[in-house]
Image (tube, coloured by chain):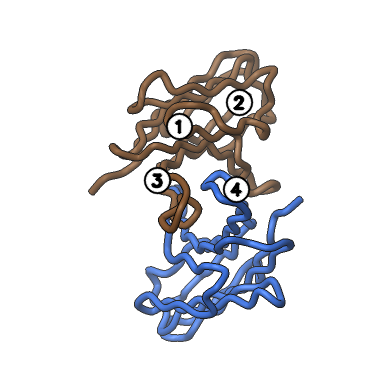
Amino acid sequence: DARVTQTPRHKVTEMGQEVTMRCQPILGHNTVFWYRQTMMQGLELLAYFRNRAPLDDSGMPKDRFSAEMPDATLATLKIQPSEPRDSAVYFCASGLDPGQGPLSSYNSPLHFGNGTRLTVT
Amino acid sequence: SQQGEEDPQALSIQEGENATMNCSYKTSINNLQWYRQNSGRGLVHLILIRSNEREKHSGRLRVTLDTSKKSSSLLITASRAADTASYFCAQNYGGSQGNLIFGKGTKLSVKP
């Protein structure tokens, strides 16, 4: 049963420290998303990759957040320096985007990992 | 913000009853998707309804879409305790998976 794998599941760190979250998308998927979930804001899209290229990271605070895909099997989200307001659950999701046409990507579902719960004290 | 809204925010019912959750959105969509999230887990896709469809079924799930009212509903029939979870609707606004906006969800509690 293919699934998106995220590590670590939990992370507690002090303000100012660097945090790196990792995601292994489902093999064969070519889109990867990073979402942040909080009670107040719900699910917010932070970054979106297609074929490892960043397509949209407008939801991400650029001064401290960075997202990369070193290869097709690994996506990373880094926060440096971390702040208490970054405390949230961070989800990675992957999907298959075949491009334009009748089987267009927007009619394909996303597959989520179980998230990394980040607490910054 | 294009974020849609689910209604109610929380719903508590007895096992065997039907559960109805509603979702409203703001602008034209390509499709609307429903996801489920169990406590401490990621979201799981349940059903997708395209803008030219009005109703869709999957097992005990029934989704309707009214584009004139910009609203959708998710009906779970004969609910079970295992259906206890948060349910989210997500609207796709453009020709890419990235244009998927999630609401804040309905927390469903099914009591045995």
**Residue A54 shows in the view:** yes
The x and y percentages for residue A103 are 41, 55
- Amino acid beneath label 1: His
Q: Nearer the viewer, mark 4 or mark 2?
A: 4
Residue matched to label 4: B99
The mark that comes first in sequence, 3 or 2, is 3
Residue visible at 39% across and 29% down in the picture: A7
Q: Mark 3 or mark 1: name the one nearer the start of the chain.
A: 1
Type of amino acid at the residue the image marks with label 4: Asn
Disc 2 element: strand
Helix or strand or loop: what does disc 4 sit on?
loop
Badge number at residue A120: 2
The reply to whether label 3 and label 1 mark residues of one chain is yes
Q: Position of residue B15 (x, y in %)?
A: 42, 81
Please identify the residue farthest to the front as the structure is shown: A101
What label sits on residue A10 in the rendered view? 1
The image position of residue A88, as x and y in percent, is 59, 37
**Marks 3/2: CA distance?**
38 Å
Relative to residue B112, is residue B46 depicted above or below?
above
